[in-house]
Each structure stands twice: as C-alpha cells, then as structure tokens.
Amino acid sequence: MNKFKKSQELFDEELKYLPGGTTSNARLWHNVCPTDMPCAIFAKKAKGAYLWDVDNNKYIDYRLGYGPIILGHAYPKVLNAVKKVMKDGEVFALNNELELKLAKKINKAVKCAEMIRYANSGTEATMTAVRVARAFTKKDKILKFEGHYHGHHDYVLFSLAKHIKSDLGKKPINASLGIPNSIRNLVFAEEWNDFDNVEKTIKRHHKEIACIICEPVTGNSAVIPPEPGFLNHLRELCNKYNIVLIFDEVKTGFRLSLGGAQEIYNVKPDLATFAKALGNGFPIALVAGKKEIMELIGTGRDHVIHGGTYSGNPISMAAANSVIDELQRKEVFESMDIYGRKLMKGMRETYDDNDVDGIVQGFPTMFQTMFTRRDKITNCRAGKSCDFNYFALLQGELARNGIMIDEDPEEAIYISYSHKQHDLNKTLQIFENAVKKIKKVKKTLITLK
C-alpha cells in the first residue's frame, strides 16, 4: 500500500466531502481495495501514452479516460489549437465559425450526418436523440439492449450488464435508485445479437416503439461486436415499422474508424450520437442524423427543445477540429491498427503458452480480455460465464507493475496514436509475468459454460 500512500490519504480526505470519495462512481477500484491498493488512484499528469499518479508511479495507459484519448494525452496539435482560441474568450452565448467548420467535416466523415447538433456529454446526446425520435414517430417507447449503456438519464438507465440476472427474466431492470418505476413501462430490453426475439418484440409492439437505441459494438459489457447481419436486421425492422434507429457511437465513433462503426458495418442509422474520441479529452458530444428528423430541433411548441450553455463552445470546437484533421491522416489509424493487432495477438499467445482459458475480442483500438472457456462472448448474459475474479487479479497485478487497464471487466482496453513499439514490448512482458504469477495462485477458472 505504501506505493500508493498519497492516493490513499487523498481518498480518505475526499470521503469527507465527496459522496463515495469520487466525482464518478466508475472511478472507484472495488476489486483491489482496500487490501491491495486504494479504492481510488489520484492522477498527477499525463503525456502521450503515459499517466503518472500523485505517488509518482508511471503507467502505460490503456484506460485513456474511458476512451476519449484517441491521439494521446496532452497531444501537442490539439493543445495548440485550443490555446489559440482561448486567448479570445471561452463562452459567448453566440454562434462561432468553428462549429460550422467542424459540422462540415463530420458531414463528410459520417454516413448519417446530414445535420448535427452539439452537446457536452454522451448522456446529453442520447437524451436528445431519444426525444427527437419520439417527436418524429409520435410514439413513446424505446427498445434497448441488455448491457448497453447510453448515459445516466432515466429513460435509458436500465438493464446494465452488472444488473442482469437469469432468474429475473427479460423485464427492464432499473439500474439506479431514483428512477420512477413508471418509466420501466416505456422500455423494452432485449439480448444483444438475438435476431428472433428482437423481431418478435417489434412485431408485437411496433405501434408503441419510437426508437431502437444500441451501441453498434457493445463497449460497456466488455467489447461485443454484432453478429454478421444483426445491424442490417435492425435497420430492416426499423424501415418496415416506422421506428428510428439510433446508433450510440459515443465509444465507437472516431475510434473504430473515422466514420465509426456505421462505416465499418455499412449500416446507416437514422440518428447517431458521438462524444469521447471526438474531443481527445475536451468535453464535446453531438447528435447527427437525417435532415427530416434533425429539423424537428428548434423553438416553439411544434419543435424539440434543445440547448446548452457550453454546447459548441470555441474551446471544444477547436479541439475537435484538430482531432478530425489528425485522424484524416492515413498513418494515424494505420499505426493504431498495427499496435492493437500486435497487442491482441501477444495476449492470446500468452494465454496459449500458459494454458489459460482467456480470450481477447474486439477491435485494434478497443477490445477486452475475458477469462472463459467459450470461444467468444455474444451478449452480456454470456459474459456472466467469465471468471471476473481472475480478471481482478490480472488488473491489480498489471497496475502494480505500471500497466493501467480498467478494473471493470465490462469496460474496454483502448489504444491511442501515442502508443509505440517500446510500449508494446513492455506491456506484453509485464502481461506475461502477471499471467504466470496469477496462475500459480489460481490454477483453475471458475466459469460457467
């Protein structure tokens, strides 16, 4: 614990002033505290692929702020763009030219982005998207998927991965206190990649369902891609039954590719939400979509109300414009793709060499490792078969040796453009040592088939 002495002291002090000792519940490290490490690590600084805590421990960072850091921490070109506009003011309560410049770039990069409205967080963006979908269809209910996270507003905070239990059936499960039970009657929660049951629910309730909202690649119950044809299936059902298809690309947008998951899978949603990687750490989000739907956003009784004091602020606009410019350079995604593939391959080889039942699935810039005897995980219920205790041991051992992945096995491992070959070599060596050490202590997985 002495290695994290100052973090522990600061956490103990924060408990007196901040509920839970943090400003975001996800930052607490429940799996390793309080015996091995503090319940929260306090950051001091970050640069490129590295992060330092207040005890001056240095990490190769694969959490990357839960995904926003696509280019690297304190990326010079982004910081310079921000510094350039900061001297002229922060927030004007007026439009600015940078928001138009960015909108044009996104319009070219993203399939569905005929029109755009800026926000400040993924939660704000999905809240607006659902409201616009309801206004457009004149229907009230939404269909979401178990294990998919769309922010912490009431209408979507149901059936998160950690709340799914087989004995509860498939009814939507409130993920938080304070959500009125009546809202559950407006939500359907289906299993990801379940072609038949999704279709049955839509056929039965299509006159009530305004939208289907999904992460096109699940990033909040580990990383679970859609099965071949599943996104097309959703698209066809929405076309047939006048339902708005919303892709929540808060994690996948500008990370899996410049055009997000919709580019990779060649499926065009009606609306999509973006955040995280678009700002490389600066707060920005947006809703993009069909003109006929987006034009409902406006003023007056016949329009959808949307606003935000900080929406479209010049600092975030400058950052995002710079990020897009960098991501358009071919070598940026090529570099991340090579690094991510090598890391995934090396992790798999380590499991094979040490006879450990581990899998690695996802994409080079966003993936996760799971301990299971299954070949792959296709939804969050299947994910419950994994040995989360083994993962906790791995995460703690990596952190103590300078490799930062999230303590939550339902999060993701992220890659940035700043990760280089020497980081890869060090990561794989520490990873191999960690796997060997854990296997001596825990020789078998506790998993379900």
Image: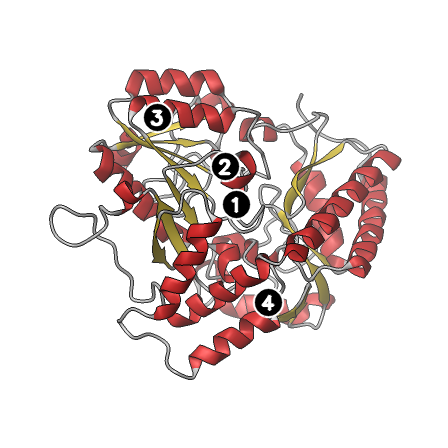
**Sequence-first disc among 2 and 3:** 2
Tell me how far mark 4 sits from mark 2, CA to CA.
33 Å
Residue of label 4: 42
Q: In the picture provided, is 347 more to the left or to the right than 127?
A: right
Q: In the picture provided, is 165 more to the left or to the right than 181?
A: right
Asked if labels 2 and 4 touch by Cβ distance under 8 angstroms, the answer is no
Tell me how far mark 2 sits from mark 3, CA to CA.
17 Å
What amino acid type is highlighted by mark number 3?
Asn
Residue at 32% from the left image edge and 44% from the top image edge: 129
Of residues 216 and 103, the one nearer the viewer is 103
Asked if labels 3 and 4 touch by Cβ distance under 8 angstroms, the answer is no
Name the mark on residue 239.
3
Tell me how far mark 4 sits from mark 3, CA to CA.
48 Å
Kindly report which numbered mark, 1 or 2, lies closer to the viewer in this rendering: 1
Image location of residue 154, percent across then percent down: 32, 43
What amino acid type is highlighted by mark number 2?
Pro
Residue of label 1: 260
Residue of label 2: 216
| Vertical placement of residue 84 versus 131, above or below | below
Image location of residue 82, percent across then percent down: 49, 74
Of residues 266 and 360, the one nearer the viewer is 266
**Sequence-first disc among 4 and 2:** 4
**Sequence-first disc among 1 and 2:** 2
Asked if labels 2 and 1 touch by Cβ distance under 8 angstroms, the answer is yes
Of helix, strand and loop, which one carries label 1?
Answer: helix
| Vertical placement of residue 292 versus 416, above or below | above
What amino acid type is highlighted by mark number 4?
Phe
